[in-house]
Amino acid sequence: MGEQIVTIDSGKGSGKMAWNQMTRWIKRAAQVEAGLLAGLAIAGLSLPVIAAPSDMYKPQPLPASNSISGEITVNDIPTGSGGFARDYRISAKTGDRLEIELTSDEFDTVVLLIANDGTTLLENDDRGDGSTHSRIFTSIEQEGEYTIRVQAFGNSTGGKFDLKVTRLRAL
């Protein structure tokens, strides 16, 4: 018996997806907090938001070392542009100055800093040195929990990456 295929109809057109890929997508979408997932592109189609109560979505805390090596795969958060992302949580105090750096030799990186209410505060695609690595410098205005989103640019699946957050000190 061959692989089961699902036909998806958005009202603007239709596309096909393998059943096992669709079930992985549904399970992952159910983990995404309302407001963070604004849309999803599958087979070039825009679909409605699928969201779950906020207590279902739990980004990983960034380790105490403030750095992590990971890998973005199709099992991570769909970005809505055909790519995927992974989220990490950090706590920051008012006045903290942060450098957030995302590098990869496998994909064009994008890094976002997201407030606790789901608002994207900062986003960087290419850090400006001719590479496709990403970097954000910021001063925190309000103490609280923040999400750092690691994602591949465009519709790239992703790959291995290194994320590092440095808390800068005044001289």
Image: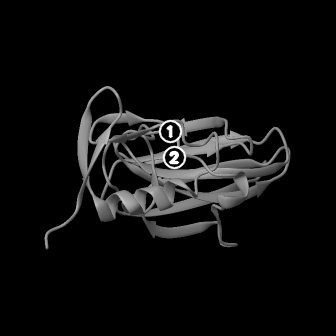
Residue 72 visible? The answer is no
Q: In which quadrant of the rendered image does the N terminus lie?
A: bottom left
Element carrying mark 1:
strand
Residue 106 seen in this snapshot: yes
From the image, tell me which residue sits under label 2. Answer: 111
Residue extending farthest to the top is 12
Note whether 29 is above or below 49 in the view shown.
Answer: below
Q: Do the CB atoms of the residues marked 2 and 1 lie less than 8 Å apart?
A: yes
Percent of width and height locating residue 104: 38, 58
Q: Earlier in the sequence, mark 2 or mark 1?
A: 2
Front-most of residues 149 and 39? 39
Q: 10 Å neighbourhood of mark 1: few (<14), some, or many (≥20)? A: some
**41 in relation to 161, above or below:** above
Q: Helix or strand or loop: what does disc 2 sit on? A: strand
Please give the residue where the numbered disc 1 appears in the rendered image: 124
Q: Residue at x 57, y 61 (%)?
A: 164
Amino acid type for the residue under numbered disc 2: Val
Nearest the viewer among 102 and 1 is: 1
